[in-house]
Image: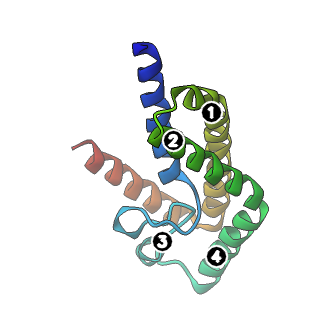
Amino acid sequence: MMKKTMTAVAVFALGASLAFAAPGDWKGHEGHDRAGLSEKMAQKLNLTDAQKAQVKSLKDQFRTDNAAFLQNFRQTMQDVHTAKQANDTVKLEALRPTVESQKAQMKTLRQAQRDKIRSILTADQRAQLDAMKAQHEANEKK
């Protein structure tokens, strides 16, 4: 019974973290747009209007291209939430492979999106973005 409970807790924690990692309109802390560059970051990087338009186009295309997957992902997270609320460890365990698979797919999709956005930036902007990311990660460890 203890193993099932721990598994259920792990699946729920994974599901909750995935819900926050999902691309879309959700804004992370300090207004960071999880699907791309936020307006605040665009200002810090001094993006041109053309670059901003390209980023917006990439974000829109991402949502269009991945709409079915994102809907399935949201449904899976809802199913995890419902099973957790019902304390249905059997359902949580059954959802685990789906959650793990979708997490891996989400990671791949988000990395591809980041790579496309980085390709729009100049070398100086990429270096500045990398420095901002390193600073953010250092602050998170404190």
Mark 3 is surrounded, within 10 Å at the Cα level, by few (under 14), some (14 to 19) or many (20 or more) other residues, namely some
Point out the residue furthest to the front here.
86
Q: Which mark is residue 56?
A: 4
Which of pointers 2 and 4 lies earlier in the amino acid sequence?
2
* Residue 66 in the image: above or below residue 80: below
* Residue 56 in the image: above or below residue 129: below
Camera-nearest label, 1 or 2: 1
| Residue at left offset 64%, top offset 76% | 56
Q: Which mark is residue 38?
A: 3
Camera-nearest label, 2 or 3: 2
Question: Disc 2, disc 3: CB below 8 Å?
Answer: no
Q: Is residue 31 left or right of residue 91?
A: left
Residue type for callout 1: Leu
Which of pointers 2 and 3 lies earlier in the amino acid sequence?
2
Which of pointers 1 and 4 lies earlier in the amino acid sequence?
4
Query: Residue at label 2?
Result: 15
> How far apart, in angstroms, are the residues tagged by discs 1 and 2?
10 Å
Camera-nearest residue between 117 and 17: 17
SS class of the residue under badge 3? loop
Question: Disc 1, disc 2: CB below 8 Å?
Answer: yes
Camera-nearest label, 2 or 4: 2
SS class of the residue under badge 1? helix
Q: Which mark is residue 95?
A: 1
Which quadrant holds the N terminus? top left
> How far apart, in angstroms, are the residues tagged by discs 2 and 4?
28 Å
> How far apart, in angstroms, are the residues tagged by discs 3 and 4?
10 Å
> How far apart, in angstroms, are the residues tagged by discs 1 and 4?
34 Å
x, y percent for residue 72: 70, 51
Image-quadrant location for residue 96? top right
